[in-house]
Image: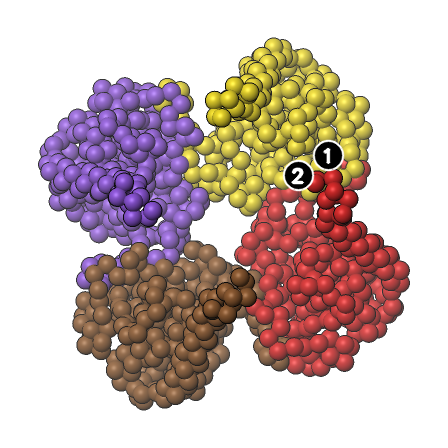
Chain colours: A yellow, B purple, C red, D brown
Amino acid sequence: MNDVEVEVLAEPELAEPVLVEGLPGVGHVGTLVAEHLIEEGEGELVGRIYSEHLPPQVSVSESGLAELVCVECHHVVLGDRDLLVVTGDQQAASGVGHYRIAEAVLDVATDFGVETVLALGGVPTGELVEDHAVLGAAANESLIETLESSGVEFRENEPEGGIVGISGLLVGLGRRRDLDAACLMGETSGYLVDPKSAQALLAVLQDLLDFEVDLTELEERADEMEEVVERMEEIENQNVPTEDDLRYIG
Amino acid sequence: MNDVEVEVLAEPELAEPVLVEGLPGVGHVGTLVAEHLIEEGEGELVGRIYSEHLPPQVSVSESGLAELVCVECHHVVLGDRDLLVVTGDQQAASGVGHYRIAEAVLDVATDFGVETVLALGGVPTGELVEDHAVLGAAANESLIETLESSGVEFRENEPEGGIVGISGLLVGLGRRRDLDAACLMGETSGYLVDPKSAQALLAVLQDLLDFEVDLTELEERADEMEEVVERMEEIENQNVPTEDDLRYIG
Amino acid sequence: MNDVEVEVLAEPELAEPVLVEGLPGVGHVGTLVAEHLIEEGEGELVGRIYSEHLPPQVSVSESGLAELVCVECHHVVLGDRDLLVVTGDQQAASGVGHYRIAEAVLDVATDFGVETVLALGGVPTGELVEDHAVLGAAANESLIETLESSGVEFRENEPEGGIVGISGLLVGLGRRRDLDAACLMGETSGYLVDPKSAQALLAVLQDLLDFEVDLTELEERADEMEEVVERMEEIENQNVPTEDDLRYIG
Amino acid sequence: MNDVEVEVLAEPELAEPVLVEGLPGVGHVGTLVAEHLIEEGEGELVGRIYSEHLPPQVSVSESGLAELVCVECHHVVLGDRDLLVVTGDQQAASGVGHYRIAEAVLDVATDFGVETVLALGGVPTGELVEDHAVLGAAANESLIETLESSGVEFRENEPEGGIVGISGLLVGLGRRRDLDAACLMGETSGYLVDPKSAQALLAVLQDLLDFEVDLTELEERADEMEEVVERMEEIENQNVPTEDDLRYIG
């Protein structure tokens, strides 16, 4: 196969579609949002990107089917909005690979008429977060204004060190193609899968793109995560010796 | 030389041949099976794959001959079955290399008329194993059924994290070529070369492909390994100080 | 995009221009000098080099604009001197990448008529430095003489182990193109950003290329760094327990 | 520049030339021999190989000249023997690079009419060696016989794990080109530069290729190394506390 290979599965006509990318990253925030959109919008798989720059790996489904690692594009309709949602189990395995796959994603997007690219991700704060702000970085100033009016924050020198990986490249390479590209990053501790940060990001998307999705499932996952955190704290506390433990030792 | 170079040494006519791959991996399970098939079936070397994606290395034979690292294809006849057995001392040295060599193996296989690909390996359990189950992952559902009827187990979410390396890719890329491709993995501790797991895998292959091979040699190697394990346990026990040691110290 | 892509933004006519490179490295000495030249000389951005061999990353400006990592070329006029100043946030991410980007920089330089290449950097001494000598390595002997007369020192076996990265390659590949190429390296501890070493390097450049720039800003940064160092020493001293601390413990 | 670039500096007519390679490796044994041959035979530089697969680096000469890292080919005449001696400061920086540079060396060799390739190196024993045997691995059996009659030893399963890097590839790829290629490896501790092992290797070469070189310089370097080892042992002994040290402590 070629270096990067695009498999087109369907070619629906889309009206001013918006690309939404959510590949694995900090707190799986981008992935949670992207998968939620596909599920709630009953997305149609329209394309796959295979590449030797992805890890040399197959994933195995619950029934035992082996599938070559790839990046998937789903067409999702929410309200009047056509979305092209990009997800997958893996990012590229090298720097050059990140560039090649980002270019391939933009090529597919361009073929579908995409002019707006939203790359989703998490930004690590290093501590447990109560209020999940959504930070932004964008390819042009008018887009910054639009995003700010939907609740996205633009803070000086954040994220420090820039944005690495496919999300950064979709914006950087998208800008070179004159696309309206932005990266939206939900604040998250960085230690755990974070459905709450994903909810915050979804709230921004709903406002920005004017659609509504049922959040029940994400809320349930958020509750589950909260229980996990509570159980972890309990276990931690149990390891502190109680008076009884001390007696026993003594 | 090119990136990947195939050297064809013989072109026998094969009847519905099955590709069996056993390159080095967990517990050397795949390699043990593949080499056993070649030895018992008095395999004929029909091709070699050289590549700059393999390690930059020669192996040295007992007599002092230096041979460039390569992947070898042997034609093996067992019962009425034509096998194309793929072995070698090394896997590719990079992710891209794994893709390139897997594609080359599939190209050779296709040239010989192969439509079924069985990639062999071990799946680590992290502890010593008594009963060596054989787990599977396959390119399509009818193959899953066939394999199950020969004793292969398909378990939800196993192997966790998918299958990495050439075995995974032969199935993943094989599926894209519409081949009947599967990965068969013998359970093994992951710490030692495991001829017992290889025997379990061979039992599945014999049932599936309807041939029989003498297992004496593998059984002998299994006995040897058992002795090694016993001796290791003895040494470990000897390091626990006995009463006499304590007296001597005191 | 291609492997390496040059974006030309302006094509001024330059008279015997000199290329001055200052990409990130030891003590950020080269970067400090290059950025100072651009600022004081009110440089014009004439070209950008993008490449998949740079890290897969965007930087984010204070206002929230995301910019793909690149190498920038500014045209700077100081006195009667035309300079082509090469800077950027990142060096290449691999050995091959260093070669490709160095070649691209030399291609751009050649297009502008450059025949002299000065690659700037720092050479680590491992201890705090009072007098910042400027060491050199050059593509030919007559250039060595010229540089020596401007205060550059050429010491036997320094820098040990040669010069790695784009600065080394601009000289090595420049020599193969018959350019007058040299590497000028300010001595620096190697632990901190070093504006004093940058000043020493600028003094050499001023003498060599016959121009003058206002050094006020670099001097201010040097003063700031001195304060940082002093504060670090204070903090270190505070961690030594005082008599009071000892009483409290006891 | 291309991936690999050969610069031809002279094209002498050679009679049945033998390629002798000595690039950096274990104990610098190969390098010591190759450089000794060039010096004693007053070798003429006939070609250089530059490559982006070598480290991105220049070396700096004593006078301050910067030279791009490369592999050098010298023509050396010793007795009636034409040698093509391959040396350099660095090996390739990646596995693929090793293949590319080994192929380039063989291309140059073929252009000069080489049919015999001797790759020199050291084989680590892990302890100080008194008698420096020379081990071999060769591309064909008649060459093994010839080498044995010149004192080269062929031992079962040595070197364990095969031969990695350019020396191994020159033999492995040389064999694929039907060249008489062999690797000759002097036993050495593996901890220090080893001129004694180099002498043992030279003795084999003198017998095999029927020439004589003055060994004085290598003997002097061997004496120097012996002094270094003695001094190291003295220092080590000084660190063992003497009776006086103990009194002082007590």
Q: Nearer the viewer, residue A127 or D236?
A: D236
Res C217 seen here:
yes
- How packed mark 1 is, by other alpha carbons closer than 10 Å (few <14, some 14-19, many 20 or more), is many
Q: State which chain disc 1 sits on.
A: A
N-terminal-most mark, 2 or 1: 1
Q: Quadrant of residue B134?
A: top left
- Mark 1: which secondary structure? strand
> Does B50 sit left or right of D242 as displayed?
left
Q: Residue at x 34, y 66 (%)?
A: D127
Residue type for callout 1: Ala
Residue B18: percent from left, percent from top: 23, 34
Residue at 79% in and 74% down: C208
Query: In the rendering, at what x and y percent does residue C67 appear?
Result: 71, 42
Disc 2 crowd rating (10 Å Cα; few below 14, some 14-19, many 20+) is many
> Which residue shows up at 66% across the image and 51% down it?
C90
Q: Amino acid at mark 2?
A: Ile
Residue for badge 1: A137
What is the distance, in whole Å, between disc 2 and disc 1 at their CAs? 9 Å
Rendering coords of residue B103 (x, y %): 36, 41
Q: In the image, is residue D197 above or below residue D160?
A: below
In this figure, which residue is indicated by the disc labeled 2? A163
CB contact under 8 Å: marks 2 and 1:
yes
